[in-house]
Image (tube, rainbow, N blue to C red):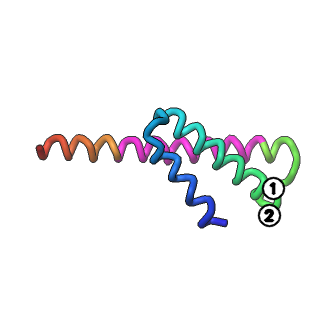
Amino acid sequence: MNDNFGCASFIYEIESWSPLKQTTVHFMLSVGLWLPLAIFIGWLPFSTLPVFLGLLLFIVVYAIFWQGTKLYLQRLAKEMNDSV
């Protein structure tokens, strides 16, 4: 299943989409895969509070990774521009 979901990163190669659209679609695919899987394998009990807290934690972790990637790419672009 991991190999199939790795294809979601190809969303970022669709140049006609804005970065916001790419990130939104990737996020929705990520949540859409993770939530049912987390409930099915027992990481989250299927009740309101655990699902809500699980989604909240997922969003926080996703945002941290997104921000880290954004900062890394900005630093990389600056280093490349400085070297030119």
Mark 2 near mark 1, Cβ–Cβ under 8 Å? yes
**Image point (57%, 47%), residue name:** 61
The main secondary structure of the magenta stretch is helix
Q: CA distance from mark 2 to mark 1?
A: 6 Å
Given residues 70 and 50, the one toward you in this image is 70
**Amino acid type of the residue that numbered disc 2 sits on in the rendered structure:** Ile
Q: Position of residue 27 (x, y in %)?
A: 60, 43
Is residue 57 located in the magenta-colored stretch of the structure?
yes
**As drawn, which residue projects farthest toward the left?**
84
**Image point (51%, 33%), residue name:** 20
From the viewer's perspective, is 26 left or right of 52? Answer: left
Neighbours of disc 1 within 10 Å: few (<14), some (14-19), many (20+): some
Residue with the mark numbered 2: 41
From the viewer's perspective, is 48 left or right of 80? Answer: right
**Image point (20%, 45%), residue name:** 79
**Image point (71%, 43%), residue name:** 55
Q: Quadrant of residue 60?
A: top right
Q: Position of residue 74 (x, y in %)?
A: 31, 40
Helix, strand or loop status at disc 2: loop
Count how many numbered circles sit on residues in the image. 2
Residue with the mark numbered 1: 39
Segment colored magenta:
52-72
Neighbours of disc 2 within 10 Å: few (<14), some (14-19), many (20+): few
Helix, strand or loop status at disc 1: helix
Q: Quadrant of the C terminus?
A: top left
**Amino acid type of the residue that numbered disc 1 sits on in the rendered structure:** Ile
**As drawn, which residue projects farthest toward the right?**
47
Is residue 43 located in the magenta-colored stretch of the structure?
no
Q: Which mark is residue 76?
A: none
Q: Position of residue 69 (x, y in %)?
A: 42, 47
